[in-house]
Image: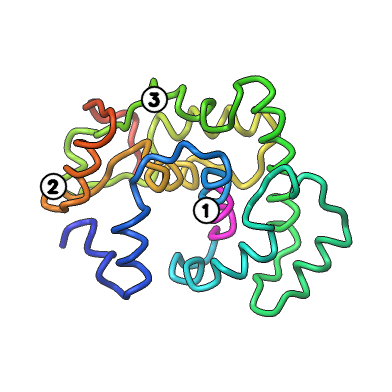
């Protein structure tokens, strides 16, 4: 079974796979949303993230990190009391904290997207062999970015979480060889082929 088989699990996964997953993101709000979803997912299923996505957007004002960075304890309580929300104060506070960290990154790099894409020279990476379905949970790139994000104060950004984020935001193209989304993305966006890099399974 190929890696992209997960897209057929249900309609929500199919839509996410076909319209978002692996498509390069160059908008800060969307980039922060992707990262926040990965943070919220820690220890939970991705199906749950997709199911509750609109609730997350409501709680965090569509992931506008300038607004989120200004949140107070009252906002934490508001989010915690929102029906259907994941009631994890640590994760909620982490997203608020990460929003402030994004602002600092923007001061240095112009945008949060500029910072992340600087690690791949603005190109989507296709690691040789990944198209056959042997996908790691993390690699050297995700470890490098994770380490720097932690140094900058970000939370819930371990190398496994960051690898998933790089897949989602299109920095790494891990679609199957026979998945139409793979070549479609390569045709529409700058890409580079690389050898495997310190992969962990």
Residue 20 colored in magenta in the image: no
Q: Which of 120 and 41 lies nearest the eye of the viewer?
A: 120
Residue 37 colored in magenta in the image: yes
Residue 38, label in figure: 1
**Upstream in the sequence, badge 3 or badge 1?**
1
Magenta stretch, main secondary structure, is: helix
Q: Nearer the viewer, mark 3 or mark 1?
A: 3
Badge 3 vs badge 2, beta-carbon distance below 8 Å: no
**Residue span colored magenta:** 35-42
Residue visible at 49% across and 73% down? Answer: 51
Q: Nearer the viewer, mark 3 or mark 2?
A: 3
Residue 173 location, x and y as percent?
28, 41
Which residue in the protein does label 3 denote? 122
Few, some or many C-alpha atoms within 10 Å of disc 1 (few <14, some 14-19, many ≥20)? many
Residue 75 location, x and y as percent?
82, 61
Few, some or many C-alpha atoms within 10 Å of disc 2 (few <14, some 14-19, many ≥20)? some
Residue 192 location, x and y as percent?
25, 26
Which residue in the protein does label 2 denote? 177
Q: CA distance from mark 3 to mark 1?
A: 22 Å
**Upstream in the sequence, badge 2 or badge 1?**
1
């Amino acid at each position: 079974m190929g890696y992209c088989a997960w897209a057929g699990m249900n309609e929500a996964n199919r839509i996410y796979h076909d319209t978002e997953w692996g498509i390069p993101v160059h908008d800060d709000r969307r980039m922060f949303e992707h990262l926040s979803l990965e943070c919220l997912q820690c220890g939970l299923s991705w199906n749950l993230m997709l199911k509750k996505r609109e609730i997350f957007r409501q709680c965090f004002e569509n992931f506008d990190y300038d607004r989120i960075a200004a949140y107070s304890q009252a906002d934490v309580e508001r989010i915690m009391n929102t029906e259907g929300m994941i009631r994890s104060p640590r994760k909620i506070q982490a997203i608020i904290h990460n929003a402030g960290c994004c602002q600092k990154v923007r001061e240095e790099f112009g945008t949060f997207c500029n910072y992340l894409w600087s690690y791949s020279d603005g190109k989507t990476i296709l690691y040789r062999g990944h198209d056959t379905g042997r996908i790691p949970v993390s690699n050297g790139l995700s470890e490098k970015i994770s380490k720097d994000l932690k140094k900058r104060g970000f939370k819930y950004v371990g190398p496994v979480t960051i690898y998933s984020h790089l897949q989602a935001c299109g920095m790494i193209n891990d679609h199957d060889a026979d998945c139409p989304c793979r070549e479609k993305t390569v045709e529409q966006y700058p890409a580079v082929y690389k050898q495997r890099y310190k992969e962990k399974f």
